[in-house]
Image (cartoon, grey):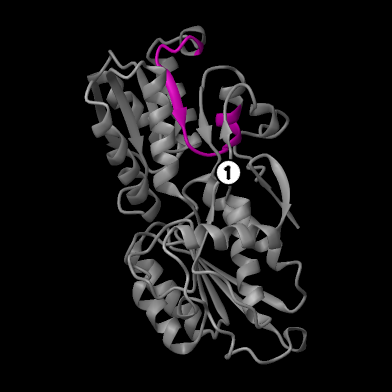
């Protein structure tokens, strides 16, 4: 299998090697931080395995693409079954979902956490039981998980916001439409915004949260524009929200020609196909890829490697290319719907 890393195809094994290097740079990965395979002495092919996936929700298409990727990857293995739950963004529901999956005897868990703490008790229980856990995309506050597969959200957010600030010339009023409050990805991205803003004292940033959906992007942008008609730029925490935000701008009287000329400038994070179409049209100026399908595949393959007696690093960050009007054709698919995710 192959992934796209900095625009180039690479193998899964190479990605694991790169991830290990990143893990060392982020603080190292000692032998005690690696999952040992003593619970799995059997030959992988000689038994059936069950993977549980606890999804935070499918309230946005990124998470749907993540689930689809997990399903597709599991389907490659004739002796692996998959159980999926959807917490609908409810911490209490996710706690119950995880208890149910453990009661059904899963051999490994993939967890897309609702927030930073809801899954911690179950993860600690898994560690005691010898059940490996892959936390995917959204960070948790505990450290008992086996491996964390995710983009560097703090870096993504800081990079996207800094690009917007450069576009507006380092001064003036901008808006940041943030992600779902309390979710690990949003917590980390907000730290990235916090890192950047003090370096630009002439920037006045208005910050409001959405939930990564198109509807929230439109609603929050409408609210922000009503109170701040003089915005020079808007940074969205996701491409799906950006599409909603552009609809709000159009409804408010902004023309596509104005948006193409940077009135206001628009940046965001991820490779949502509808957002990529806006970048191709010159309306969006910058994004950083955040690929759900790579997250899903790497999560499953990490568990398979453990089932086969191998080891995985504690941290497996995925860090990909910038997307701009100059290179967007490498990522966008104009024949696919807005909700399509190529990677």
Q: Residues in magenta?
A: 260-276
Q: Is residue 263 magenta?
A: yes
Q: Quadrant of residue 88?
A: bottom left
Regarding residue 271, the answer to whether it shows in the image is yes
Quarter of the image where one finds residue 245: top left
In the picture shown, does residue 267 fall above or below 190?
above
Q: Nearer the viewer, residue 231 or 191?
A: 191
Residue at screen point 27% across, 40% down: 194
Indicate whether 116 appears above or below 191: below
Q: What residue do we see at 32% from left, 44% from top?
A: 190
Quarter of the figure with the N terminus: bottom right
Does dot 1 land on a helix, a strand or a loop?
loop
State the residue in front, 286 or 245. 286
Q: Which residue occupies the foreground of this view, 88 or 136?
A: 136
Which residue has dot 1 on it? 320
On the image, the x and y values in percent for residue 133 come to: 50, 74
Asked whether residue 183 is drawn in magenta, I would say no
Q: Residue at x 44, y 59 (%)?
A: 56
In-image side of 102 versus 5 (left or right): left
User: Can residue 149 be spotted in the picture?
Assistant: no
Crowd class of label 1 (few under 14; some 14 to 19; many from 20; radius 10 Å)? some
């Amino acid at each position: 299998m192959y992934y796209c890393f900095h625009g180039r195809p690479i193998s899964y094994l190479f990605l694991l090697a790169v991830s290990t290097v990143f893990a060392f740079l982020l603080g190292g990965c000692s032998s005690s931080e690696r999952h040992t395979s003593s619970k799995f002495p059997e030959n992988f092919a000689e038994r059936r395995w069950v993977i549980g996936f606890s999804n935070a929700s499918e309230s946005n298409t990124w998470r749907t693409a993540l689930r689809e990727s997990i399903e597709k990857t599991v389907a490659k293995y004739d002796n692996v079954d998959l159980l999926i739950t959807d917490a609908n963004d409810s911490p209490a529901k996710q706690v119950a979902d995880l208890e149910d999956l453990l009661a059904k005897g899963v051999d490994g868990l993939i967890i897309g956490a609702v927030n930073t703490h809801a899954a911690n008790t179950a993860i600690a229980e898994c560690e005691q039981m010898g059940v490996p856990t892959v936390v995917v995309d959204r960070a948790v506050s505990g450290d008992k998980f086996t491996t964390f597969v995710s983009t560097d959200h703090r870096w993504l957010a800081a990079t996207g916001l800094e690009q917007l600030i450069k576009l507006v010339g380092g001064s003036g009023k901008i808006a940041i439409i943030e992600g779902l409050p309390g979710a690990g990805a949003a917590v980390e991205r907000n730290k990235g915004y916090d890192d950047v803003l003090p370096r630009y004292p002439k920037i006045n940033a208005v910050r409001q949260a959405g939930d990564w959906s198109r509807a929230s992007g439109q609603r929050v942008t409408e609210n922000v524009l009503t109170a701040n008609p003089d915005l020079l730029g808007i940074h969205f925490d996701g491409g799906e929200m950006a599409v909603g935000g552009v609809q709000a701008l159009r409804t408010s009287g902004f023309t596509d020609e104005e948006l193409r000329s940077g009135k206001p400038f628009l940046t965001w994070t991820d490779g949502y196909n509808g957002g990529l179409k806006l970048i191709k049209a010159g309306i969006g100026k910058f994004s950083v890829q955040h690929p759900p399908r790579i997250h899903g595949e790497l999560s499953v393959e990490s568990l398979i490697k453990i089932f086969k007696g191998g080891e995985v690093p504690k941290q497996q960050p995925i860090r990909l290319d910038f997307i701009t009007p100059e290179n967007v054709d490498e990522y966008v698919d104009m024949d696919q719907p807005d909700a399509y995710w190529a990677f």
